[in-house]
Amino acid sequence: MSSADLIIEYSKNPSNKGILENATIRYREHNRVCADVVEVFLIIENGELRQFSFDGYMSIVATACVSITGELLEGWKYDDILKLNESFIHENIGTDISPRRRYASLIGILAIKNAIHEFLQDGKKEDFSDIVI
């Protein structure tokens, strides 16, 4: 499946969209460039992302990429998630996302990482420049 087909499918049917009421942490991220707003809901247990959901007002690309990213990261140790950058999106979604939609494709991974930082209370907050390669 091409990345365009993948994005269209996930934007129409995001597998994990909705509010996870029993979330360990919830975090809201904004993309000031294109006005996307995503809120992620994570259940973290034993250093691992056990469950993920999201909600918000986003473009088609952001919706699809947030959904795909969260789906892929369930079961990962949060230490490994914090090491991720844009290459994760390239490897799992594709490299043909237009430059205008670049940050939209990254907002999910940024929100998840910042939710983990908040959960850890480590005083860190990443922005797009921390994950762009």
Image (spheres, rainbow, N blue to C red):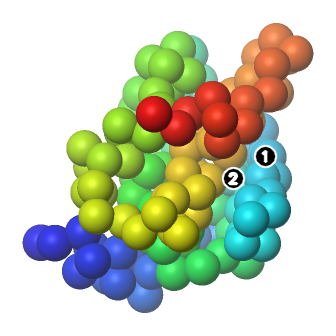
Residue on which the image places disc 2? 40
Residue 68 appears left or right of 34: left
Mark-to-mark CA distance, 2 and 1: 5 Å
- Compared with 110, 67 (above or below) is below
Note whether residue 65 is visible: yes
- Secondary element at image label 2: strand
The answer to which image quadrant residue 38 occupies is: bottom right
- The C terminus: image quadrant: top left
The image quadrant that residue 45 belongs to is top right
- Is residue 47 rendered to the left or right of residue 1? right
Residue placed under numbered mark 1 in the picture:
26
> Does 84 appear above or below 41?
above
* Amino acid found under the numbered disc labelled 2: Val
Point out the residue furthest to the front here.
99
Toward the viewer: 10 or 53? 10
Q: Mark 1: give few (<14), some (14-19) or many (20+) Cα within 10 Å.
A: many
Can residue 73 be spotted in the picture?
Answer: no
Instruction: Say which quadrant the N terminus sits in.
Output: bottom left
Q: Nearer the viewer, residue 2 or 77?
A: 2
Closer to the camera, 2 or 129?
129
Residue 102 is left or right of residue 118, and the answer is left
Q: Say whether marks 2 and 1 touch (CB < 8 Å).
A: yes
Secondary structure type for disc 1: strand
Percent across and percent down for residue 27 are 79, 46
